[in-house]
Amino acid sequence: MTGGQPGTGPGRHTRAVPADPADRMAWRDTLGQSAGLRELAAELTARHPHAADLLADVFLAAYQVRPRLRDRAGMDASRLANHRVVTALVASREFADLRRETAGDPYAAAMAVLAQASALRRMLEHARDAADPAGRAARARRPDGAAAGHAAAAAAGAAARQAASALRAAARTGAAAAAEALRQEAALTRAWGVGPGELARLPFAERARLAERLRTSRLAAWADLIGRFRQMASGERARRTEHATGELVGVTLGDDLTRLVPSELVHLGLPQLRAVFAARYAAGELMRYDSQGEQATGRGAVIACVDTSHSMLVSGPGGVTREAWAKACALALLDQARRAGRDFVGILFSSADRLRVCRFPAGQPAATADVLAFAETFLGGGTSYQAPLTAASRLLAEEFDGAARARGDIVLLTDDECDVTQEWTRGWQRAKRRLGFRLFGVAVGAPRAAAAGSVLDALCDNLRSVTDLTDPRAAADLFRVI
């Protein structure tokens, strides 16, 4: 006999959904790995002796690519209630929607079973109620019945129809709730950059722990913002063109020999001025045309310095905190770096003695656990620019000395203003000239930090202020030039 244990009658089946050996193995393995499924089976079996077979049927109906049901006539009488439940589920439009999330994925199929636990309890009761009135109605229609018997039969038939209707309603509600739960979980994992391939490789228990962590920690509240950041950044990458000339808007200083103004070319042609030209070229002080086009992107590491001082917990309209905005931006920069084949480093900072460095080399996968650890870490305390920027410049110096890569990019995300010493500033400027990196500043929810003449303004090559913490577009230009 295929698909179940031996029945009480010859040729009778105990499973409503036929399954081949591979499908049966998928159920056994999943049941063995899921404590939740085993607990649900034990709970339901205490009231409904054959509930374990029902859970297998529901799992298989969700897991199989083309599930089918056995004919009711071939079922063992003890499993007819199970057959009614599975029939009601499979017939619903909501279950068809659910299967888009579960087909071929044993973890998702198991989560669908667990998400329908309450509905399954109700459906088993309704299935039993639908069977009992039907039996009473059949007995009441026997030839020796009187008028009272016909009335009882009519009442029993109405009760059976009502129970069957309630069963179908519970099936629709349960399947819809399960589909929504799975969609939300999928959205959470996508928002955090966990792809379907990575999920499929995770053991069942690890995948369940990851989902629980995303669902119950404060990270869950950031998922929508992170998703919108990643979508925005992807769109900006599509618009970006490297080395675009763009519209000429004036004259500036630099060392780009392809865009020199004619008078500089004249100086180059005069032997007595060539030494002056060479000195100005070395200092990046040649006059060249400026344009509105996109600048060339960097080739060194992308480093996001994220302020995690106490003030970053302040929330703006919509309940989004400064920390959430800054870390969503940093995670989008992680994506940006990986797509460009560049190293990414996240530096979490607050006071001068509180610093954490999270490295994501370009040639290695970004482990989900490491990404979440970077996002979850909060140091508290005050704010020091010198500590994170010094750490960032040292990392870029290591990269330059070890791999000869220059033109790194540092993004400083902060909501505060703090002083830096003159001695430190001189060292910082020397490092910038040697390594050729750029510093982009983002004043998150604090326009004061981005005011003209502020320390942040003086340090940064490019500075913007973010006031609407629900909108990632304030950082859009970062993803065109980094």
Image: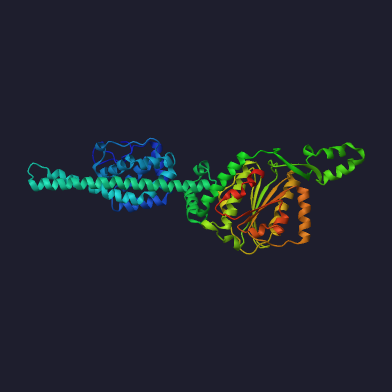
Q: Position of residue 88 (x, y in %)?
A: 30, 42
Q: Of all residues shown, which one is farthest toward the bottom?
A: 381
Quadrant the C terminus occupies: top right
Q: Residue at x 27, y 48 (%)?
A: 166
Front residue (pair 452, 48) = 452
Q: Dividing the image into 4 quarters, which one contains the N terminus?
A: top left
Horizontal placement of 286 versus 339: left or right?
Answer: right
Can residue 65 be seen at all in this image of the molecule? yes
Residue furthest to the front in view is: 249
The residue that appears at 40% across and 45% down in the rendered structure is 179
Frontmost residue, 413 versus 136 = 413
Q: Is residue 455 above or below residue 193?
A: below
Q: Position of residue 259 (x, y in %)?
A: 77, 38
Instruction: Answer whether residue 374 is visible to the viewer in this image.
Output: no
User: Residue 176 appears at what percent x and percent y?
Assistant: 37, 46
Q: Is residue 295 above or below residue 379?
A: above
